[in-house]
Amino acid sequence: MAAQAFDVVVVGTGPGGYVSAIRCAQLGLSVAAVEDDRPGGVCLNWGCIPTKALLRNAEVVHLFERAQEFGIAVAEWKADYAQAIQRSRKVADRMAKGVEFLFRKNKITLFPGRGTLEGARVVEVAGQGGARTLEARRAVILATGSEPRSLPGVTIDEKRIISSTGAVTNESRPGSLVVIGAGAVGIEFADVYATYGTKVTVLEALPRVLPVEDEEVSALIARLFSRRGINVRTGVRVKSVTPGGSSVAIAVEAEGKTETVETDQVLMAVGRAARTRGLGLEALSIATEKGFVTVSSTMETSAKGVYAIGDMAGHQMLAHKAMAEGVVAAEAIAGQSPRPVDYANVPSCTYCRPQVASIGASEAAARNGGREIAVGRFPFTASGKAVALGETDGFVKVVADKGTGEILGVHIVGPEATEMIHEFAVGRTLEATVEEIVHTIHAHPTLSEAALEATLATLGHPIHI
Amino acid sequence: MITKVLMPKLSDAMETGKVIKWLKKEGDAVKGGDVIAEIETDKANVEIEAFGAGVLRKIIVSEGGQVPVGDLIGVIADPADDIASVAAAPAKPAAPAAAPAPSASAPPAATAPAAASAPRPAAGGPLPAMETYQSVPATTAVMPMERVAAGASAPAGGRVKASPLARKIAGQTGVDLRLIQGTGPGGRIVRADVEAARAAPRPAAAAAAPATARPAAVATRPAFVIPPRPEAEYEDVPMSAMRAAIAKRMPMSKAPVPHFYVTSEVDMDAAWALREQLNGLEGQPKVSVTDMVIKAAAMALLKNPGVNAQLSGQGIRVHHRAHIGIAVALEQGLITPVLRDCDVKPLARIAVESRDLADRARGGKLRAQEMSGATFSISNLGMYDVEEFSAIINPPEGAILAVGSVLQKPVVDSGEIRVGRRMKMTISCDHRVMDGAMGARYLQDLKRLLEEPLRLLMSSTI
């Protein structure tokens, strides 16, 4: 079959891919999108979105548990995990259909199948209806994302040893679960399973949970999780993971001693690896570094006209970073001069209970940067809105430069932390200082007042504490 | 007061710099504007000057040392100041306060009255950083620039687009925001711009007396070693830093910038005669053809703002001043020092300053702010007996003028053939920013100014 030509061919339709496809189309380019799974990628189908649905279920379960506190007597209630999974699937389906709708709206042609680069401007699509060749007149955007990693010698079978993909589809909830890895993924699933009644153990090799977050954040989450009965063990090494007939044996080394932990299921959450195999990068000698594709500030790879965005292009493996890169790539391809992605200003969010969100440098990193800093903290126990909500765990912590008031980093644990962080994201983009934040009137009563107060605290005069 | 001496960022590409020489020793007294060290960058050797007065208390980076831009290389302080914390950690920007003693020619008004009150409040007192550009105060009389302070909260600075953080750092360090070109969206000045400007050294004495004011320090420039002729047929010679910089920069212009060229021939008889007359005047500086072209080019730019323009983000930035980059050939390559505000400077001043710039460019004695900020460039190969050529645009500028020799030619004048002087000029334009007709109209105006050269002696506007 003769090659079909488009201005741009996007391989992969996760958040990076579909956003870049839409932005290309908005800029008047004809776009083909190649997808070997469902549109929306891991994020919409197996990652961000379905887990947020499960976490919402967990939140509702938790509220039922607390009904008494609000003076509500619930005679009998039952949380069915299978139905939580079913609801989560419906949410994912709806969002994936949303992407298909956006493709139609923007006249983007979707080619189901696996895309391989056959040249800098040629993508071969191996789909169910046979192979076809797509020619990219202007550029190819690679956005194939990432896949779960495992520990050496441990095979993820999605039955006894599952990845996040297995965790969002398994309707049967194990009696006990060991989560290996206490990053955002591990912590979020620990939250869901534990709320539904699974006995959860979290194993982390580093000294603290959520190791990329500020130390105070890690400490508080570890404490709150332990209080909920989650067994949080940090600084431990997993020596082996051995699936048996009905359980899995995990050899754990802690403080020089090795012990065995038995569990029904293991969730492997030790990170993700770029998904670049079989893409045809080698034939074009596209440069990679530690498994990630090397790109310029406009996301172009070492092969002219081939762009790479999202998880495969390194930096933070986050959907919103991928989307930002998708826009940069699309605008560069359309001949504009987009501002490069500012990797120092990407919010990081974990949607456990209470939520965690941060942006910029941790207190330790800011101190190590050699600057004189001012740290302001405000606990939600002192926030009227948080007390009214009955959600007082957590704090807002602002790290600022003492001399200039530059907002170096912000760390929030608490209700809706992931929504609150954007005040500081905007502030940092505009290079606002603490003075602009404290000069901004924050509505009362809101959780965001805690942001104002923590910022005031960097100047030494918070009002409500 | 403690003033930190930082490795200046002298160009966008510059990441590290090398201290070639300290001209002051530890313990030497320095005052603002004193040349204290020489720095080698990828493009040139540059002198850096003291921002603050006091004693050069500590040299952090010794001669030959190479450090990243922004690193502390020395500390100036009063003998009584405790510099231990500063010398250890980079932190507080020093307040500019009363420190910079104005150099000989700087207007006395520039002496900071802010006194030594240490942490400068956001109020917008007159900033001593006014002295940042030496050519500016020297020509204050003809500059239609109002002097507003750009303090953090000073509403007078409202016309300057700058982030709050940039304003605050500028206020604390005495950097004048109006003299900075912003790199943020829509030309907004962001922190990095202020820090770059702050790291850049201030200029010193007046350009008016270049011959005596500056020691000829050609010797300090590392020689470009051409290897002795070997037996082998060829040899691969490593690029000098400057050639590497040119090699890196020029394709960034030629490849992505769609150039177009417009050539025009100018009758130079009148200009030649005027120049001879001017050069016959006693006590006046010698004027070169290049000087006349610079003046004419700048005047024509103001009349054709579309040519005095460059691509900026997603829009076009039209400059309201004519800062002219003048290509100066060096042994190692070339460099384009910038003569600022040529539209308002009298021809005689342009003559003096352009000679000074070229001399110092060849001597490796350019100052940081003289190496960037051009809105348009001129390359004159006339002295090489070149009839015409075309030049590559020096990004981010939008156009460059290539000037050939003034040649005696047979010309037809009222039906008769006679000998006349002619000069060819070719403008290279960025087609993304302007079109052929704009380039042609510009050349037409430029040609008219040179053919009626008395216009160059008139007031700054045409």
Image (cartoon, helix red, strand yellow):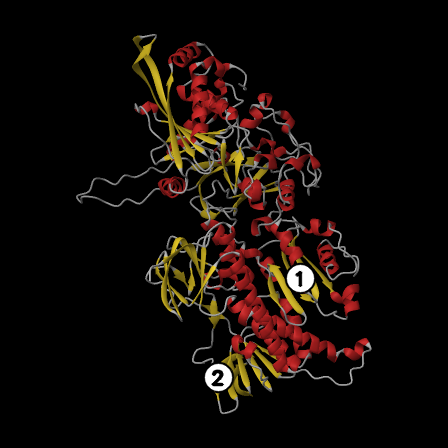
Residue B159 quadrant: top right
In the image, residue B462 above or below residue B167: above
Q: Please give the residue where the numbered disc 1 appears in the rendered image.
A: A419
Quadrant location of the N terminus of chain A in the rendered image: bottom left
Q: Which mark is residue B428?
A: none
Callout 2 crowding tier (Cα within 10 Å): few <14, some 14–19, many ≥20: many
The image shows residue A217 at horizontal and vertical percentages of 64, 67
Residue B156 visible to the viewer = yes
The image shows residue A236 at horizontal and vertical percentages of 54, 78
Q: Please give the residue where the numbered disc 2 appears in the rendered image.
A: A241
The image shows residue A32 at horizontal and vertical percentages of 44, 59
Query: Tag 2's secondary structure?
Result: strand
In the image, residue A329 above or below residue B288: below
Please name the amino acid that badge 2 sits on.
Answer: Val
Residue B124 visible to the viewer = no
Which label sits in the foreground, 2 or 1?
1
Q: Are marks 2 and 1 in contact (CB under 8 Å)?
A: no
Residue closer to the observer: B29 or A181: A181
